[in-house]
Amino acid sequence: MKQKIVIVGLGLIGGSLARAFGKYTACCVAGIDRDPAVAEAALSCGAIAKIGTEDDIREADFLFLSLYPQACVEWTRSHLASIRPGCIVTDTCGIKSWLCPRMEALAREGGFSFLGSHPMAGKEKSGFAASDADLFRGASYILVPCGAPREAVEMLKSAALPLGFSGTVETTPEEHDHIIAFTSQVPHALACSYVMSPQCPKHRGFSAGSYRDVSRVANINETMWTELFLENRQALTEELDTLTGHLTEIRNAVAAGDAEALRSLLRRGRLVKEGLGE
Amino acid sequence: MKQKIVIVGLGLIGGSLARAFGKYTACCVAGIDRDPAVAEAALSCGAIAKIGTEDDIREADFLFLSLYPQACVEWTRSHLASIRPGCIVTDTCGIKSWLCPRMEALAREGGFSFLGSHPMAGKEKSGFAASDADLFRGASYILVPCGAPREAVEMLKSAALPLGFSGTVETTPEEHDHIIAFTSQVPHALACSYVMSPQCPKHRGFSAGSYRDVSRVANINETMWTELFLENRQALTEELDTLTGHLTEIRNAVAAGDAEALRSLLRRGRLVKEGLGE
């Protein structure tokens, strides 16, 4: 029998999940969005097979919540009576320590399985219009099992892998948030800080790959990232302090004209990168 | 008659210039490198037509110095008697305020034309082995005319444009160095600082484009960049202070849990990037 999938939130990630399930699996995908025009657009272009109803939620094998973290919790709380025991519920949020305990409490109350997940894929654009069936090709799929039964974890893996992920990693909410502060949140804070330089508007003709790479994600969705940053306050503050600390060491060596200190700092960076085989 | 080009220093940039002149123009290219094995390698793979001699220097229409800044000055001083009046000498260095006055003094002494130039192209790898005839395709070619006659500037432009550059911009040494501190030097300092985080070695499975982009140039040639950073001490120190200042504003908003301040900082970054049409 066809697996029934309900995707709540048809933005960049939810829309891409819908398209990918449609393209690469035989699952039946119902989509829900608070904006009726988005749900209609997803239906009319074939990204979803139907617009999801309470009955679809009741019959779902998998429920993907592609909403901001607070909205995930609110949506789940208000649909608790419709989620059947046995349904596997997951999110796609960029933070977990704030989210997972709240969702686990709701899962216990509603008798369903919850595990966190985070597809490591994105774009500089957001919204359904930017969604793409191939967004996840080659990306890692992070699983945060929390208290979910092993069987639920394996079922989510099996459902997701045909979408083109390069593989999965499993972790705790705390480890997820600390590494993500480094790999994803710091680069976004950095891109915005970087383009604030008075030199930025003069870059054309004077720039190449380095400018492009550091500034790329400055095209930020500030509402979403404000929520994600504040729900990962401690780890992100720590990572930003680590970065500015190292930047300041380089700055001080430059300002002092200390070639030996500067060379040794830059070498340290190179050795880390080389040590990773990159 | 074929134009005669001598390229001194057959690393990534000099080697790529040699290959590009060979591939896209009818110029005769002689190459010089302090390492005889590199010059032999360039000759045997056809990247240069011959290994340059003092006679080639004497007959050159263009002399490209693809050396570190201090080595440019030293090489020129020690070959001053061989550079004929009428020869157009240029460098390919990433800093100009330190270099240009020194090279201009030598040009006056030797009676040749000097103008600074900086092809905005590079790679994470250095050395002749990484050189590529198509390195300059789509890149900007920055010209720093200093006191060179207009005719020399136009001749260098005409010689270089067939190599695939998207265009040229002209500027002063001071403006060059301040913008380059932002577009190129800060991203290199940043990449090294970024990978020094204790989280870095754990990134696999938890990272995507953002990590890759910010860390890309951490594979740094620390000897070259130490010299370039220290020869642009003031502008680089200023740009690093500007960046850490903005990063600290974001950090403080995160640490204080101040959603309004954080949203407004991120929005400011987005508006700059959008305002540039990027």
Image (cartoon, coloured by chain):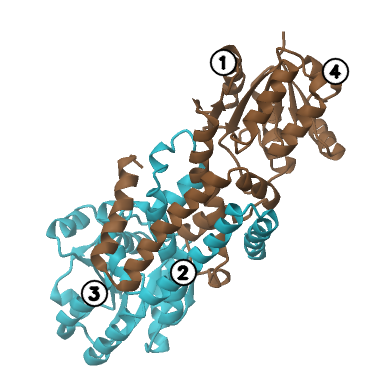
Chain colours: A cyan, B brown
- Closest to the camera, between mark 3 and mark 2, is 2
Q: For mark 4, what is the residue?
A: B55
- Closest to the camera, between mark 1 and mark 3, is 1
Residue visible at 19% across and 80% down in the picture:
A58
User: Alpha carbon of mark 3 to alpha carbon of mark 4: how far?
Assistant: 75 Å
Instruction: Name the amino acid, label 1.
Output: Glu
Q: Give the vertical position of A32 relative to B134 (above or below).
A: below
Instruction: Report the quarter where the N terminus of chain A lies.
Output: bottom left
The numbered mark, 4 or 1, whose residue comes first in the sequence reads: 4
- Subunit of mark 1? B
Tally of numbered discs? 4
Q: For mark 1, what is the residue?
A: B154
Residue visible at 31% across and 59% down in the picture:
A19
Instruction: Name the amino acid, label 3.
Output: Gln
The numbered mark, 3 or 2, whose residue comes first in the sequence reads: 3
User: Alpha carbon of mark 1 to alpha carbon of mark 2: how far?
Assistant: 49 Å
Q: For mark 3, what is the residue?
A: A70
- Closest to the camera, between mark 1 and mark 2, is 2
